Image (tube, rainbow, N blue to C red):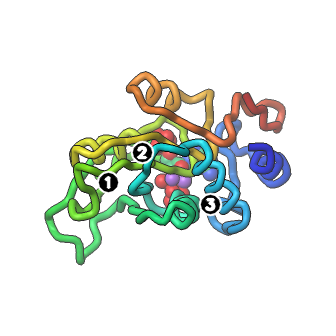
Amino acid sequence: MDLLKQRIQADGLILNNSLLKVDSFLNQQIDPELMMKIAEEFVSRFQGEKITKILTIEASGIAASVMTGLILRVPVIFARKRKPKVTGDDVYTANVYSYTKGESNNIIISRQFLQADDRVLIIDDFLANGEAAAGLANIVEQAKAKVVGIGIVIEKSFQPGAQKLAAAGYRVESLARIKSFANGQVNFL
Ligand code: G4P
Ligand code: NA
Ligand code: NA
């Protein structure tokens, strides 16, 4: 997606040769027009999949997910990283280890929001090691629902997530695929 790649080139900052800081349009300030274009691209790539729900994880996956849900007129669910006080015990959980943060979290979704006949599109902002997406897919499968695919805004293709998810049989569609960070530059595949 050229518009997204241009925005990454223009506004992205590379930290420690491994992290891309995109706080000005994705991770803190959000550009709604760009998010809508991203959503349109997801809708186009997963056309014909009869998606019934979008599933993401708080916080940064929510913006692109809501826009996608708006176009498709389907509900958007986001997994919690901590159990909210008002959430009961009727939940699905999956353990997600974050290499970036060096800690593991139980991600949580109330069972009432996923049914066996759901066709779920998983969306997230970044794909690095694939742990978050794999945890979300695991929860969809606990609900006996179907993962129709995984839509990612920015894939760091030099990390193993995309390959791991593809090897597990999931269709991964990433709108920007980063091959490397070299000499302070973002190089796309
Ligand atoms: P994984 O799910 O693919 O295994 O990723 P990992 O645990 O390594 O990532 C942990 C957090 O760091 C995630 O956000 C992920 O989106 C983010 N992340 C990974 N690589 C980058 C990067 O290069 N740039 C930025 N900006 N973020 C990256 P999170 O902790 O869940 O936070 P949020 O969704 O609340 O933003
Ligand atoms: Na995320
Ligand atoms: Na993130």
Quick check: 100 above or below 87?
Answer: above
Q: Earlier in the sequence, mark 2 or mark 1?
A: 1
Of residues 180 and 52, the one nearer the viewer is 52
Q: Amino acid at mark 1?
A: Ile
Q: From where the camera sits, is residue 99 visible?
A: no
Q: Is 77 situated left or right of 123 in this image?
A: left
Quick check: 142 above or below 73?
Answer: above
Pointer 3 residue: 27
Task: Name the residue: 61% across, 39% down.
Answer: 174
Q: Is 6 situated left or right of 146 in this image?
A: right
Which structural element holds mark 1?
Answer: strand
Pointer 2 residue: 132
Q: Earlier in the sequence, mark 3 or mark 1?
A: 3
Determine whether the beta carbon of the residue marked 2 sits less than 8 angstroms from the nearest atom of ligand 1: yes
Q: Earlier in the sequence, mark 3 or mark 2?
A: 3
Q: Amino acid at mark 3?
A: Asn
CB within 8 Å, label 2 to label 1 = yes
Of residues 48 and 12, the one nearer the viewer is 48
Q: Amino acid at mark 2?
A: Ala
Q: Quadrant of the C terminus?
A: top right
**How would you rate the neighbour count of disc 1 (Cα within 10 Å): few for under 14, some for 14-19, many for 20 or more?**
many
Task: Name the residue: 48% across, 65% down.
Answer: 73
Pointer 1 residue: 107
Q: Position of residue 36 (x, y in %)?
A: 66, 62
Determine whether the beta carbon of the residue marked 3 sits less than 8 angstroms from the nearest atom of ligand 1: yes
